[in-house]
Amino acid sequence: MKSLGLVLSLLWTALPAAGADSSYIGMAAGGARIEALMVPGAAETSPAVLVIGGMNAQQGSSAVVLQDVKKYEGLARNRRPFRLLAIPLANPDGSRLVFPPAGAAYRENPESHALWRWIAIQSPDLVLIAGDDDFGLAAALSQGSVAGVGRVPARRVAAVAGILDPIIASKNIPRSEAHVEIQRRRSRSPRQVAEELGKVYGKEFNDLTYIPGMGLIGQLRLGRTADVQTLVSPFVDGPKAGTPGRPVSGNLAGYLVFAELAERTRDPKYLQMVKDAAGVGFTETGEMKESMGSSNGMSDGVFMSIPILGKAFKLTGESKYCDMAARHLAFMQNLDLRPDGLYRHSPTSENVAWGRGNAFPALGLSYALSDCAKGTPAFNMMLRQFQQHIETLSKFQDREGLWHQVIDEPASYAEFTATAMIGIAMLRGVRNGWLDAKAYQPRIDRAWKAVLARIAPNGDLMDVCESTNKQATLKDYLHREAILGRDIRGGGMALIFSTELAGL
């Protein structure tokens, strides 16, 4: 299949270019990137038509699609009645495709999942599939809700030049169900989204970790303090409470819920829990340890430990907590910060810059900086590292506003939580004056727009990476399941993003 890709690349290069944008929709089972091309229509609101070739690694249909794209590009923009999306080589390995897709995305049937979910989010008004076999894609798009978004009219056409000619001539392309739904999703305000998410997430706290905890913090911002106090009470003075002076969980970010409660209620029992968690970084005589000891070598440890130290400082005024935050950051960077400014997930993870493994440091530092005293050596060190990391991350945001499962592999799937978390970090950076608003506000806006499209009104989410411990290889990270449906972690982070944008 590499030779086919080369042929198509040479054909594309040989044809006169006229401004098509390109991106990747995913990766084939064998690792080949699946490319999409986009040609703007006469207006931003023009309907969208998607043409697909190479559904069975068919070189002929791929060449036809490329030729039609070039022909359409050659039209003056004011004569283009629709936005054109094209996938010239949808199935480079010639895999057996399944629609609707089966199995865990994108570990199983990766090409099928990539096509299905990408089409749902792009929400074209018409899909044309060139070639003799579409594996049932046209029927699946037309008859069922695509990835929970809506139906898309689709049909199979012969792989001959002029596929688009009848569509150009008709000038009448009704909006698809999927298009209407994506527009509706993107029209919601942050407050509306927060209220929708609040009906689903932040309703349980069975484990003292950040995963359910972020949803509870979102509920606090929505004014539901009493409900949250009831949920956390087993860990405060109930059967799940730890012994005095000892935190219950090694996942110290779970204690951020108690920090938020301490600020709101001034109840000393919540303050004590924050001090217990932050105290992990100190010896019995009060000296700082080398690190917080809760990272297990993973870059997640920046978020799991540093924000609670910032909260401990905010609540007590004791500078030792922010000093410890800076020390722990230096410890984690020594383990995981790559020379290019991205974090590998762990020293044993084949140097992979996992998406959430970079979102954790970005978000964790934005929290600590929000609470620690400005202008101190600890603050200045953390601020410098935050700015450098955010600048590096900004280079890898894709055209739609997303960060990917593997930050520096653009064909890995666009990951929901990493995008939300980095978006929050940038938002805090802009609002506190740590980042230039002119440079970063557009990135925040694009990230929010991308997240919005992937949140259904019932709380279902698209492409949340499953729980991930340290993995051995790049392939392992690429094959972590991308959840389509409800997910406590993703819902909690989306709730935080929406409430921060809403100013709650």
Image (cartoon, rainbow, N blue to C red):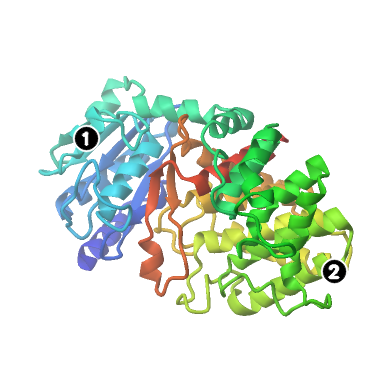
Q: Amino acid at mark 1?
A: Ala
**Badge 1 local density, few (<14 within 10 Å), some, or many (20+)?**
many
Evaluate whether residue 285 shows in this view: yes
Q: Which residue is mark 1?
A: 140
Out of 51 and 494, give the one closest to the viewer: 494
**Badge 2 local density, few (<14 within 10 Å), some, or many (20+)?**
some
Residue placed at 76% from the left, 67% from the top? Answer: 279
Residue placed at 55% from the left, 38% from the top? Answer: 203
Residue 378 picture location, percent across and down = 82, 69
Whichever of labels 1 and 2 marks the residue nearer the N terminus, that label is 1
Residue placed at 21% from the left, 51% from the top? Answer: 63
Q: Which residue is mark 2?
A: 320
Q: Quadrant of residue 295?
A: bottom right
Q: Amino acid at mark 2?
A: Lys
Q: Taking 489 as reference, is 172 left or right? A: left
CA distance for labels 1 and 2 = 59 Å
Out of 289 and 478, give the one closest to the viewer: 289
Q: Secondary structure at mark 1?
A: helix
Q: Quadrant of residue 275?
A: bottom right
Residue placed at 77% from the left, 63% from the top? Answer: 383
Residue 151 picture location, percent across and down = 30, 28
